[in-house]
Every structure is written in C-alpha cells, then in structure tokens.
Image (spheres, rainbow, N blue to C red):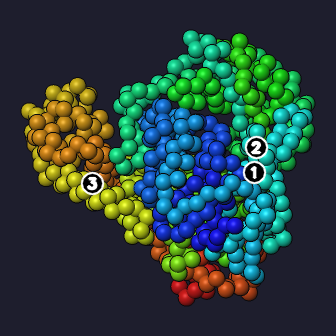
Amino acid sequence: MLGEYDIIVVGAGHAGSEAAAAAANLGSSVLLITMNMQTIAQMSCNPAMGGIAKGQIVREIDALGGYSGIVTDKTMIQFRMLNKSKGPAMWSPRAQSDRTLFTIEWRNMLEQTPNLDFWQDTVVGVLTDGNKILGVKTLMGQEIKSKAVIFTNGTFLNGTIHIGTKNFGGGRMGERASENLTEELIKLGFESARMKTGTPVRVDGRTIDFSKLIEQPGDAEPGKFSFTDTPVLNKQRSCYLAYTSTEVHDTLKTGFDESPMFTGTIEGTGPRYCPSIEDKIERFSDKTSHQLFIEPEGWNTIEYYVNGFSSSLPDHIQLKALRKIAGFENAKIFRPGYAIEYDYFPPEQLKYTLETRLIQSLYFAGQINGTTGYEEAAAQGLIAGINAHRKINGLSEFVLKRSDAYIGVLIDDLITKGVDEPYRMFTSRAEYRILLRQNSADLRLTPMSYEIGLASEERMRRVERKNEIISELVKFFKKESISPDEINSLFEQKGTSKLSQKVKIETVLSRPQIQLKDLIENVEGISKFAGQYDETYLNECLEEAEILVKYSRYIEKEKEMANRLNKLEDLKLGADIDYFKISALSYEAREKLSKVKPETLGQALRISGVSPADASVLAVYMGR
C-alpha cells in the first residue's frame, strides 16, 4: 500500500521530528512513522526547553535550520536567561512551554513541510540485504522500502513502567511499549542494555496554596531561542519554589521497602544529575531538605509539574509525602510519578554521522543512544536527518567538531566515551565554552548549514548583515575615544577609578563594572552610532560586539588552543587498522580502539582507556 521512500524515520519525538524535518527540507522523500499521531514531539517529562548547556543546544539547532527553537518561541509561557551573573560562556536560555500547544505547533510545522508523509503504526523489524538497510516491517504487516532508516524510539523499546510494586509495559503513561524491535536488532549483531528514567506527580493547581511558595517570575525583558522573527513574550506565567523537609523524607522512607529501585526490580541505570526524590534522600542523607520547582503546564490549565519530586514509590506514599510540603497540604494529583526502564543501544556502535557501523544507512538518534533530555535528542535527530540525506545522495558527511558546537561535543562524547548512565549536557563538558556561546550560534553554524542546503537564503543574509554590524561596532569601539568629562560621573556611580585623559572605548569596556548599555545611555557619540542601525536585531549585535571586545584575550586564546588540537582531529586514522597488531599500545587501548574505531587521532585521545602515550604511539604509526 505504501510506496518506497528515500528515508523512513521511526518515532516522532523530539529526535524523530527534527530528523524528518531536516531530511525533507533537504529534498528527500520522508515517511515519519509514529505509534500515535496525537503525541508528536510530546514533552513527556517537564514542560520546558533549554537550561544550562541545553539552551545552547536549542540555539544551535535553530542556527542549523531546525524547528525546536521556533516551536519553543511560539509556545513559551515564561523565559529566563540562566547564569547571567556569570560570564557569557555560561549564559543559558530556558523557557517554560505550554505542553499542549508545543505538540500542536510541532505537528503543524511538520504537516507544512514538503516531501514529508506520516503513518501511524509500530515498527517491529527491519528489512536488510546483508549489511545494507532496505526498509522496515510494521505491526500492521506493512513492509515499507527505503534507502535509509532513522530509529528514534525514545523510551518505548520494551519500556516497563514502575510504581511501587506494580509494573506494566509502556513507553509512556497511557501508551504501549514497542516490542520485538530490540530482539530483531540483536539478531543483526547489535548490543543493547537497559536504562531508567522517571517523572514526578502532576498536581491540581487549585489545591496548591501559592502564598506559602516563593514566586519565580520570568525575565523582565524576555528573550527567545530562534534567530528568526518569532514572537517575543508580552506576558508570562510564574513558576514557584518549594522545599521538602525531614518530615517529607521520613514519610517517603516508609515506602522504601516497596521501592523498585531498592528492591532490585529496576536493573537499568538512572540519571545521576536528575535523580528521583528517594535516590536523593538515600545519597544525600545529610541534607534535611531539597528544592522543588513548581512549573505550570500551560496558559489555560490548572496542571502543575513538581520538578525535583520524581519518584517510583507507591502512589499513596507519594501523595502522603507531597501533602507534608508547605503549600501542598490539601494537594490533589492527576497522576503519580513513575520510573520507566527501556532498552538502548550503546553509542560506540555508531559513526560520527550517527549511522550504525553494522548496517549501512541505518541511523540511531535520541534516547536509543543512551541520552536524556529533549534538547540532546533533537540535536541528534537533526544530525542524523542531515547525514541520512547526504549518504543516499553520495555527498560528504556532515560532522561538527567539539570546537564548532555543543552538538559536536555531545556526539563526540557518545561515540568515544560511551555511556554508563543517561547522558545529559553540561557547560563543563565543553572545553571551548567561550567559543560556543549561545548568542553566537547563528554566526558559527548558519553558514555551514546554508552550504549544505538546509538553512534558507533569508537566514544566511541575516547572518551576513549581523556580522557586518558587529564588525562595524567593534571597529568603532577600537577607534573612538571617550573623554573624562563624558564618563567620570558614570565611573563614580559604578565605583571604578576616574579617567585622567582620553581612552579608547574598548579600554573602558574592558572594565568589569562597565556594561555597553551604560555607555549608550551616558555617551551621546556611542548612542548616535548605535542608533543608525535597524533595530530588528541590533541588541543581538550590541551584545556580541561587547563580548568580543570585553573578552577578546580569552576568545583568542581559546581559538589558538582549538586550532592546535584540531590538527590532531585532521590526522585521519584508517578504518582498517588492526590495533591488536600494534604491540606498543596498551592492551586496554587496543581493545577500546578496536571497538570504537576512531576516525582521527583527536577522537582516539578522548576514548576512555587511551593514554597520551598510546596517542604518541599512534602518531608514530601514522608517520607523524
């Protein structure tokens, strides 16, 4: 019944949606297969996008031509820029979204994407010819042919939901698990393992006493994620802070003997950085309280998400403990928290394009690779969609380096280091943080995306104009001077030493107490110069120009380091090297290198178990 497609994407979560959009926008005919057309890109856990390092990823996805940033801007109910008290390398945008509108908007955008078809069904197997993918088999008996397949199955592969001593199959509460596919892939030679994640109770907001909570409003001047002309928020909904107590912890402990985590029912590894409340109590027994974030689920709903109260304890224990929290004494819940175990495939089995090593033109993206988070999944989907299209058209691989993007760090970490717990991104994972600032994502990545045909002409022209304005601003700051009469009153207000003679604007900006907005408000020459530009994205240009001047030494130093290390990245290692024959390598290095098969010396260096001495041996072996 269904014809042949260039690419089949299995799963319509965040990874699958980005993969389908990217491949279709590049010109491939794409079939997106999902078990439920009503839950496309659903926010299965908290109703938010971005956060520390994750916000950088969403901006990179947008800069590359993905949809996540646009959808977030259109559906957000609150925006905050996190870490503003720190340097610009740490600034991270985060938005609360309307959960229902988010799914609706994603589906709307996908339905308007040319070359993209949909099919509601469950994929239960693959069609192959030796080590080449030919298509998929579905539960309804369809055999659909394609040139490439991208699996983005999320938590659905043999998913099991746990609530106390109760457990049942499911990929998400109320939705069945995907069965048989793991076993089919194992037959082809893939390794699989189990992981665990969880989600908290959802609470009826009418039963919360918000007067006992701490209000957390959005930014007074809310930003956005997309570099396109998406709407800016003109009203916002507040989040709130609450705290657990020893009484809450003691109540939760009464259910520990029924906890699937502590009884051994759950075998999969859970996320270290987003543990369940019972795990926090056990691991941090010295703490008498834990912070909770109370997040609204949308504009017009009474449902609230209790971030930090994830649990798989019996439902009656969860409710009893919840009611011990100040403000929740009379709380009613829509559903309890639960843990979910699911199959994943260790990502060392992938190439840097996210194509599997075993089967040509078969790609894995998202939680199937052992990651956690919408943002990490969406980034992988985008890269898999781009590379699947390029592979079937005989084009070169699209791979981002660690110095190019957080997305490059993410994929490099997965392939070279593997995962032993659900992987999430942090700024600390990126060694080039000051180069990978969230505000510069379009300047870094849109030209790359435009070159491969994904970013539009309009996006590229916008980046070019933005670059021109930033360059002109920086030149002005380096060339023009400020006199003591113009600035000393401001310096006195800011508590910094006065000028005794004229100095360049860049010298003034290098003072930590002085911001560019202060100069624009107080120095007529600067305000006039800035005022000659179109305000469409002037603030973006001013922010970037200020960073380039204020942090120029750090930026140049990091660029030099990246250039030196990228020489290692450019030293290709042959795919057919027999590492076991290189006796000077440690045995562990031989094992790890044989398994991962790094493409470059730089990638080899980052593999756990490969020492600098081993890297030197490889350099000699390669004639360096």
For disc 1, the marked residue is 156
| First in residue order: circle 3 vs circle 1 | 1
Q: What residue type is labelled 2?
A: Glu
Which residue appears at 37% of the width and 61% of the height?
456
Label 3 – label 1 distance at C-alpha: 43 Å
Q: State the residue at coordinates (31%, 46%).
A: 540
Q: Residue at x 62, y 26 (%)?
A: 304
Q: Which of marks 3 and 1 is in front?
A: 1
Q: Nearer the viewer, mark 2 or mark 1?
A: 2
Compared across the picture, whether 408 is left or right of 182 comes to: left
Q: Do the residues labelled 3 and 2 touch (CB within 8 Å)?
A: no
Q: Is mark 2 on a helix, strand or loop?
A: loop
| Image marks 2 and 1: residues in contact by CB distance under 8 Å | yes
Residue at mark 2: 175
Query: SS for tag 3?
Result: helix
- Relative to residue 27, is residue 48 depicted above or below? above
**Among all residues in the image, which is located at the extreme front?**
1
Residue 136: x, y in percent? 73, 68
Name the quadrant containing residue 186: bottom right
Image location (x, y in percent) of residue 334: 72, 25
Task: Tell me the kind of residue under disc 3.
Answer: Lys
Contact between marks 3 and 1 (CB within 8 A): the answer is no
Mark 2 packing: few (<14 Cα in 10 Å), some, or many (20+)?
few
Disc assigned to residue 466: 3
Q: Of marks 3 and 2, which one's residue comes earlier in the chain?
A: 2
Identify which residue is drawn at 47% across, 31% down: 78
Q: Distance between the residues labelled 3 and 2?
A: 46 Å
Residue 442's label in the rendered image is none
SS type, badge 1: loop
- Visible in this render: residue 457? yes
